[in-house]
Image (cartoon, grey):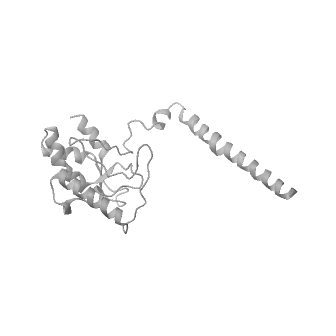
Amino acid sequence: MNALVKQSMAGLRVLLILTVITGILYPASVWAVSRIPGLHDRAEAVNTTLVGVDRDGDQWFHTRPSAATLPASGASNKGEHNADYDQVILQRRTEIAAREGVRIDQVPEDAVTASASGLDPDISIAYADLQVKRVAKARGLSVEAVRQLVEKATHGRILGFLGEPHVNVTELNRLLSAH
């Protein structure tokens, strides 16, 4: 019995120490470092283009769908062999095809599949191209003017060979706001 009490007390001490280190000291030190002059402006996630924000309305480009509910982020954990998932994909594909005025088979995959975090700001060039006519019409701009904005928000492969070229929707919608 005495050994059980000693082990329990040792476990509780370790729990308390780790709770103080990881729950108080580490977050406080990260916060303190973020307040160092010159770092503060970079530490805050204000005006970032790293987070996708989907805006309502035809005058905006839309991001990938999100399986998350605000304010949290996260995936749905539904796999490709899940019947519910198939229904969700078909519903999204139908809605996007109707919104963009195209056939269902013309809707790109990234338009109907959520990113892992639900906050991805990037879409494929194909999905951006699909939205150009709708946005141009809603904003009273020429299709060519909107395509030029898409081009400005288009980024190539990382290091020239990793990933696919993509369009940052947050950046693109900011460019639209300036027009």
Q: Most extreme residue toward the top, as rendered?
A: 37
Relative image position of residue 149 (x, y in whole percent):
22, 43
Q: How many marks?
A: 0
Relative image position of residue 41 (x, y in whole percent):
46, 33
Image: 2 above or below 21: below
Q: Residue at x 43, y 60 (%)?
A: 77
Image: 123 above or below 58: below
The one nearer the camera, 64 or 97, is 97
Left or right relative to 62: residue 137: left
Q: Quadrant of residue 81?
A: bottom left
Relative image position of residue 94 (x, y in whole percent):
22, 57
Q: Residue at x 75, y 53 (%)?
A: 11
Q: Most extreme residue toward the right, as rendered?
A: 2
Q: Residue at x 36, y 42 (%)?
A: 49
Please say whether residue 88 is visible from this viewpoint: yes
The one nearer the camera, 71 or 136, is 71
Left or right relative to 85: residue 107: left
Which image quarter is the N terminus in?
A: bottom right
Please say whether residue 145 is visible from this viewpoint: no
Which image quarter is the C terminus in?
A: top left
Relative image position of residue 120 (x, y in whole percent):
37, 50
The one nearer the camera, 77 or 84, is 84
Image: 101 above or below 55: below
